[in-house]
Amino acid sequence: MRYIFLATILSGLLILGMFGLRGHKFNETPVEIFPDMDRQDRINAQSRSDFFADGAGSRKPVNGTVPIGFSIPEVAANEGDAILDGFSLTGSYFNSGQMGDYFGDGMPVEIKANKAFLIRGKERYGIYCAICHADSGNGNGPVRSFGPNGGQIPIANLHDAKFSDPSNSEYRPDGEMFSIITKGRGLMGPYGGTIPAKDRWAIIAYLRVLQDAKISAAEQKDKEEAKESEKVSTEQT
Ligand code: HEC
C-alpha cells in the first residue's frame, strides 16, 4: 500500500516536472503532446526566401489582379475624374452624389438603368439593407426585434414621404441617398467601404421602384374604395 502511495506522489512530481505549473514561463520548447500547428514554416515580410526561384519572399499579385470590388477603370486617373467602378473617389456625381455643393437627383449619366441593373439593385438591397429596413422597405427588418428598449430601434421607413415624395420639403434626392449609403447617417453606419459605387446606385434605383410600387398600390386601393363607396351610394338612392 505504501509503495502505491509513494509511486503516485513520485509520478505526480514527475508529470509536474515535465509540464510545469500553469502560467509558468519556460525558455525551452515545452513538451507538446498536441502541437496545434503552433510552429510552422513561414516567410517574414520583405525577406529572402530560397523557396522561390527569384529568391524574393514577398510575392507579386498574379498579373491582372484587381482589388476586390473594383473593375479595371475605363479612363486613366490622370485623364480627369476616372470612373472607377469601385469604392470612394470624390469628384463626379457618380462618385459623390453631389453636383458642386448640392446633392443631385436622378441616375448619373454613366449608369444604364436597365432591367439587369434593377435586378442587381434588388439583390444588393436584400444583402445589405433588408436586415434592418425589411424586404418591403418599411423598417421592420429582423434587426427590429433586437437591441435596447425592447427592440424599438428607430429604423427609417423608406416609404415615408420624406424619402419617397419629391414634393416633400425634406425629400432626399438620389444624390443624398447615395451620400447616406456611403457615409451613413444618425444611427445608421456607412456602407461606402463595403458596397462599390455602382451597386449603391443600383440599390437606389431599386428603392425608387419599391417606393413607386407602394404608391401605385395605395392609389389602386383608393380608386377601388372610391368605386366601392360610389356603388354603395348609388345603391342607397
Ligand atoms: C444595421 C441596420 C441598418 C442597415 C443594414 C441599413 N440601415 Fe438604413 N437606417 C438604419 C437606421 C437605424 C436608420 C435611422 C437613422 C437615424 O435616423 O438615426 C436608417 C436610416 C436610413 C435612411 C434615412 C436617413 C435619413 O436621411 O433620415 C436611408 C435612406 C437608409 N437608411 C437607407 C439604407 C440603405 C439603402 C441601406 C442598404 C445599403 C441601409 N439603409 C442599411 C439602419 C440600417
Image (cartoon, helix red, strand yellow):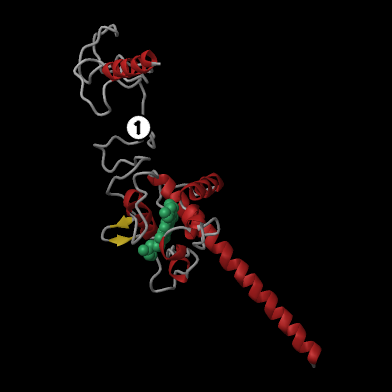
Where's residue 202, x and y in %? 46, 49
Query: How many numbered markers are drawn?
Result: 1
Q: Which residue is mark 1?
A: 67
> Could you tell me if residue 6 is visible in this image?
yes
Q: Quadrant of residue 189?
A: bottom left
Quadrant for ligand 1 reads bottom left
Q: Considering the numbered disc 1 on the image, is that residue within a helix, a strand or a loop? A: loop
Q: Nearer the viewer, residue 60 or 81?
A: 60
Where's residue 71, x and y in %? 39, 34
Q: Is residue 225 left or right of residue 105?
A: right
Vertical arrangement, residue 70 with respect to residue 144, above or below: above
Q: Amino acid at mark 1?
A: Pro
Q: Is residue 137 left or right of residue 74?
A: right
Where's residue 233, x and y in %? 75, 88
Which residue does the image show at 20% across and 16% down from the upper left?
47
Quadrant in which the N terminus appears: top left
> Could you tell me if residue 173 is visible in this image?
no
Q: Residue furthest bottom?
A: 237
Where's residue 124, x and y in %? 48, 47
Vertical arrangement, residue 79 with respect to residue 177, above or below: above
Which residue does the image show at 44% across and 69% down from the upper left?
166
Q: Residue furthest front?
A: 1
Q: Quadrant of residue 174?
A: bottom left
Which residue does the image show at 49% across and 53% down from the upper left?
131
Quadrant in which the C terminus appears: bottom right
Mark 1 lies within 8 Å of ligand 1 (Cβ measured)? no
User: What crowding class fits label 1: few (fewer than 14 Cα within 10 Å), some (14-19), or many (20 or more)?
Assistant: few
